[in-house]
Amino acid sequence: MAAVDPFDSAFGAGESEGAGEGAIPSERVRRMEVKANEAFDIYRELYYEGGVSSVYFWNLDDGFAGVVLLKKSSTPGGSTEGVWDSIHVFEAIERGRNTHYKLTSTVILSLSATGGSLGELDLSGNMTRQVEQDLPVDNDDSHIANVGRLVEDMELKMRNLLQEVYFGKAKDVVGDLRSVGSLSEGARDREAQRELIGSMKR
């Protein structure tokens, strides 16, 4: 985003240092890239309450493509720490008044908790999902809205899946090894889940 130098557009000021000529987007695609960065800056504040984000676009023969990058780290030094990285790569194939979107999303999540009644916990992993959808387009702003909705829906689904995979599967494995603990322990585990996942993405 504009406020974070490392995440400024790679094609700002009409230059692309170290990139080939084919990497420079058209004026139209560059304008959409700027608008997408502004839109996802708002998205980041709403859903992540901090972190950093960036969006890059490039041309395709029959449309355009791009990547949306979002990163949030919890404040270091506390009893819980974690990092959420999401990478959303999309293609937009334009077909008149409709566009075919293909979105491939990867979330990399690392969580840890130390001390207190929770003991020690260290989990990390990643998940990739893909979706394709045809959506109507009135103008270039429609592309920004369509990509935004696709990313928003995908992140919500993946967040819920990660919570199930990280904690639900671990609970199943432990349950196979040892009988289920007391109700108070179950409540404590659920609170730990909410605290860790919630600190990454609300």
Image (cartoon, rainbow, N blue to C red):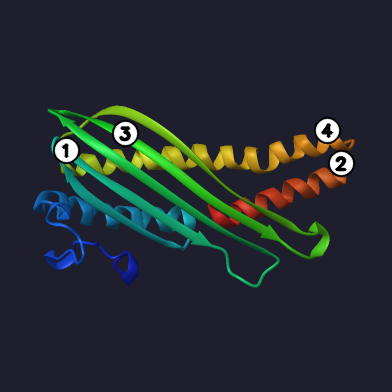
The residue that mark 4 highlights is 176
Q: Are marks 2 and 1 in contact (CB under 8 Å)?
A: no
The residue that mark 1 highlights is 63
Query: Label 4 crowding class (10 Å Cα cut-off): few <14, some 14-19, many 20+?
Result: few
State which mark lies toward you, 2 or 1. Answer: 1
Q: Earlier in the sequence, mark 3 or mark 4?
A: 3
Mark 3 vs mark 2, CA separation in Å: 44 Å
Q: Earlier in the sequence, mark 2 or mark 1?
A: 1
Which disc is residue 183 wearing? 2
Query: Quick check: 159 left or right of 115?
Result: left
Residue 202 in sight from this viewpoint = no
Query: Quick check: 56 left or right of 164?
Result: left
Tell me the element at label 1.
strand
State which mark lies toward you, 4 or 2. Answer: 4
The image shows residue 127 at horizontal and vertical percentages of 52, 41
Q: Nearer the viewer, residue 193 or 132?
A: 132
Query: Label 2 crowding class (10 Å Cα cut-off): few <14, some 14-19, many 20+?
Result: few
